[in-house]
Amino acid sequence: MPDDAEKANDAVAGAVAAEPAKARAGRYLRHTWMYTWASLLIAALVLLVVLIAQNTRHVRVGWVFGHSRVSLVFLVLFATVLGWILGVASSVLFRRRARRRLR
């Protein structure tokens, strides 16, 4: 008489055998993409740490009215985030204008 562990193993083997090849390939593809994105995220974080470590000196920034001294890394990060936000905003505006013309 089989015990519970053998029944569980038989159930798992039956479930794996019942999985279609296309579904298995899709699952493997999703796992591959997940690991790829995780690796890219880790690489981006490492590059961000290196950027911060190498740009710690202060620079003089000229504004419309006066000057100030700012850490270079904050200036670079501010410019990057501002550029990203403006890029997203312009993309949204162009998409809305294109939809209006299609109506």
Image (cartoon, rainbow, N blue to C red):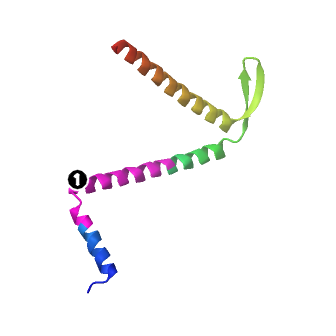
For the residue pair 97 and 34, the one nearer the viewer reads as 97
Residue 58 is covered by the magenta coloring:
no
| Above or below, 97 relative to 56 | above
Q: Which residues are magenta?
A: 15-41
Q: How many marks?
A: 1
- The kind of secondary structure element at disc 1 is helix
| Above or below, 103 relative to 50 | above
Residue holding disc 1: 22
Residue 37 is covered by the magenta coloring:
yes
Where in the figure is residue 59, as x and y percent of width and height? 72, 32
Q: Which residue is rendered at x = 49% and y = 22% of the image?
A: 90
Quarter of the picture holding the N terminus? bottom left
For the residue pair 76 and 103, the one nearer the viewer reads as 103
By secondary structure, the bulk of the magenta-drawn segment is best described as helix
Where in the figure is residue 103, as x and y percent of width and height? 34, 13
Q: Is residue 37 left or right of residue 3?
A: right
| Above or below, 70 relative to 26 | above
Where in the figure is residue 4, as x and y percent of width and height? 33, 80
Q: Which residue is rendered at x = 37% and y = 54% of the image?
A: 31
Q: Residues within 10 Å of mark 1 (few under 14, many from 20)?
A: few
Three-letter amino acid code at the position of disc 1 = Lys
Q: Which residue is rendered at x = 61% and y = 48% of the image?
A: 49
